[in-house]
Amino acid sequence: MRLGLTALLCFFSVVLQCDCTPPTCYSRALSLSKEIMTLLDKIHSFYRTKACAEVLPVIHIDVHNACITNKLRDFLYVVLNHPSQSCRDKPRMVVLKRKTQKLYSIITRVCYRDLVFFTDDCEAIDTGRSSPNLAEDRLQLLQEDR
C-alpha cells in the first residue's frame, strides 16, 4: 500500500514539474504589464489610495508599442517622486513602484532586443485606444506626395 502511494506521489510530482516552463522575457513583460494594470485599477478604486491616484498620469501599458519605454519612464518618475510622503509609503504604491521598475528594467535592459514593437502610437498609451489605420494613413500620404 505504501509503495503504491509513494509511486503515485512521485508520478504527480514529475507531472507537475514537466508542465512548468521557464518564463521568457516576453512572457514576463506581458504578465508584469497585466499585474500593473490590475494594480492601477485597484489603486484608482480603493478609498485609501484614491487621493494618491489623482497625481498619477493615465497609462495603458502595451509592451508591443514602441512608445512604452518613454511613457513608462515618465510614469515611474511620477510614482517615485509622488508629492505626498504618505502616498509613497502606502503598500499598494510601494508594490506599484517595484513592479513598474521591474517592467522598465526588463524592457530596457534584459529584453532590449527580444521584444518586437508592432506600433508606435503614443496616443494609444495615454488613451487606451489605438488607431488601427495609422499605417494605412501614412502609406496614403506617401503615395499622394509622389
Image: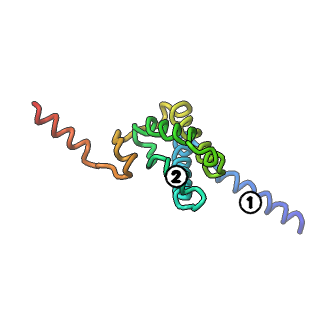
Q: Which residue occupies 70% across, 52% down?
A: 17
Give coordinates of residue 12: x percent, y percent. Answer: 74, 60
Q: Quadrant of residue 82?
A: top right
Q: Is residue 124 left or right of residue 107?
A: left
Front of the two marks 2 and 1 = 2
Question: Which residue is at the front of the view, 90 or 35?
Answer: 90
First-in-chain label (2 vs 1): 1
Label 1: state its secondary structure: helix
Query: 10 Å neighbourhood of mark 1: few (<14), some, or many (≥20)?
Result: few
Q: How many marks?
A: 2
Question: Which residue is at the front of the view, 59 or 84?
Answer: 84
Quarter of the image where the N terminus is located: bottom right
Residue 47 seen in the figure: yes
Q: Which mark is residue 48?
A: none
- Quickly name the residue at label 1: 12
**Which three-letter amino acid code belongs to the residue tagged 2?**
Ala
Question: Which residue is at the front of the view, 65 or 19?
Answer: 65
Question: Which residue is at the front of the view, 89 or 9?
Answer: 89
**Which three-letter amino acid code belongs to the residue tagged 1?**
Phe
Furthest residue to the right?
2
Give coordinates of residue 90: x percent, y percent. Answer: 65, 50
Q: Which residue occupies 75% across, 56% down?
A: 13
Q: Which residue occupies 52% across, 40% down?
A: 78
Q: Are marks 2 and 1 in contact (CB under 8 Å)?
A: no
Q: Which residue occupies 51% across, 32% down?
A: 108
Give coordinates of residue 129: x percent, y percent. Answer: 34, 52
Real-space CA distance between mark 2 and mark 1, rounded to the nearest whole angstrom: 45 Å
Residue 59 seen in the figure: no
With respect to residue 35, does 3 lie above or below? below
Q: Quadrant of residue 14?
A: bottom right
- Quickly name the residue at label 2: 53
Label 2: state its secondary structure: helix
